[in-house]
Image (cartoon, grey):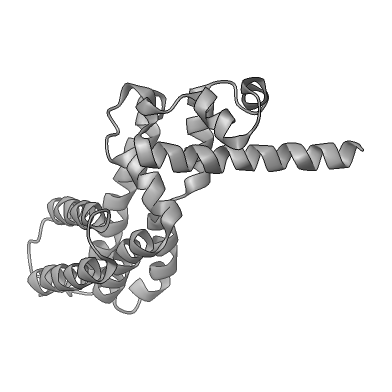
Amino acid sequence: MPRRTKEEAEQTRRMLLSTAMTLYAERGVNRVSLKEISAACGVTHGALYWHFRNRDDLLQQLYLMSGHPFELQYIEQRQSAKQDPLQALHDYLLGVVRAYVEQVSYRRAYRIFLTNPELPELSNLKVQIEADQALVCEHIHYFLKQAKKKKMLRKKLPLTTASQALSGMLDSLIASAMAQTGEDVMNQARLLSQIFTDGVRG
């Protein structure tokens, strides 16, 4: 039946994506072949190519599927920023770190795409990855700008420099989430975020 065949094809596609995500996260994109992915799913090599043109296409679909907690947390905190932008910034930072601590899908995506984004296998995604990373700095800049409008920041604070510094701190916390227990990382995130917001507050 045509509908059943379409549903089965979509099920196979999801299985290929899930398996690829797991294997790439465990071993790296440069150490897993497409044949290994199809074999792990119990389908032919040709079946994988029916769903994805090549490895670049598979990686592109994985990247789009994996999503990013940054944008979700930004949207969630924008409303709060109208009342207390520094608290919203604090909650944004903790929300991003918590997402990486608690959600396996984000952790796997980080290992694949952000642990070593200079890998030749990720070259076709380089511009997109860099653009998404730049958004984090823009999010932080937004919260600081709102705080400046409310005269909550110390005078002459360079917003761009502060945004870049905090973005770097967030990167370090996320990297720590890959190696440490969740509660340890969250405690670090709370402390560092509090130190930062106290330091910029006017």
Residue 150 lies, with reference to residue 175, above or below; the image says below
Report the residue at 40% width, 30% height from top.
Answer: 125
Quadrant location of the C terminus in the rendered image: bottom left
Quadrant location of the N terminus in the rendered image: top right
Residue 66 lies, with reference to residue 190, above or below; the image says above
Residue 51 lies, with reference to residue 74, above or below; the image says above
Report the residue at 42% width, 28% height from top.
Answer: 32
Whole-percent x, y for residue 133 in the image:
31, 44
Report the residue at 70% width, 43% height from top.
Answer: 11
Residue 2 lies, with reference to residue 156, above or below; the image says above
**Towards the viewer: 102 or 41:** 41
User: Residue 25, can we see it?
Assistant: yes
Tally of numbered discs: 0
Whole-percent x, y for residue 152 in the image:
17, 75
**Towards the viewer: 30 or 190:** 30
Report the residue at 34% width, 67% height from top.
Answer: 95
Whole-percent x, y for residue 196 in the image:
13, 67
**Which quadrant of the structure image shows residue 116?**
top left
**Towards the viewer: 111 or 60:** 111
**Which quadrant of the structure image shows residue 72?**
bottom left
